[in-house]
Amino acid sequence: MTAYALAHLRPQPPLHDDVFTYMERIQATMDPFGGRFLVHGTTPEVMEGPLDGTYVIIEFPDMDKARAWYTSDAYQEILPMRTKNIEGTAVLLPGVPDGYDAAATADALRAAQNA
């Protein structure tokens, strides 16, 4: 099942040169794990609520590959270039299976809540 790395970043200009080096090197760390950017370097169109920062979404074939990328020596080597210069949060998220039904999830959550 597909998995995603999601980062909510709050960069403050001017960006440190390490951030640009990180951006230049990140794709090479993702390639061995089948990672690809879905969202990167775009301006969000805010529909609800406040927004402070920007988002990055990276797709991986599965959670094992996503975890392996994040913990890989190659990524850990460049990670401080971002974390020391941009405040933010990063998470790994499992995707939903084919045929996912939000209504069925609502039913299960309602039943668990009322149990």
Image: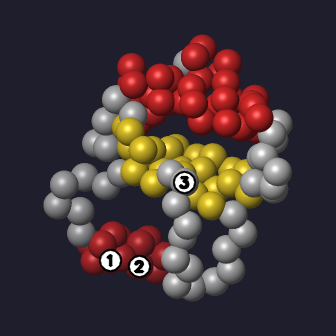
| Residue occupying the point 54% across, 70% down | 44
Residue 104 pos. (x, y %) = 27, 72
Is 57 in front, or is 22? 22
Please state which of the two labelled residues, at mark 3 or mark 2, is closer to the viewer.
3
Determine crowd level at label 1: few under 14, some 14-19, many 20+ residues with C-alpha closer than 10 A. Answer: few
Which residue is denoted by mark 3 in the rendering?
41
Mark with earlier residue (1, 3): 3
Measured in 3D between alpha carbons, the distance from the residue under mark 3 to the one under mark 2, in whole angstroms, is 38 Å
Helix, strand or loop at mark 2: helix
Is 38 in front, or is 67? 38
Helix, strand or loop at mark 1: helix
Residue 17 pos. (x, y %) = 77, 35
Q: Are marks 1 and 2 in contact (CB under 8 Å)?
A: yes
**Residue 68 showing in the rendered view:** no
Of the numbered discs in the image, which one, if any, rests on residue 107? 1
Of the numbered discs in the image, which one, if any, rests on residue 110? 2
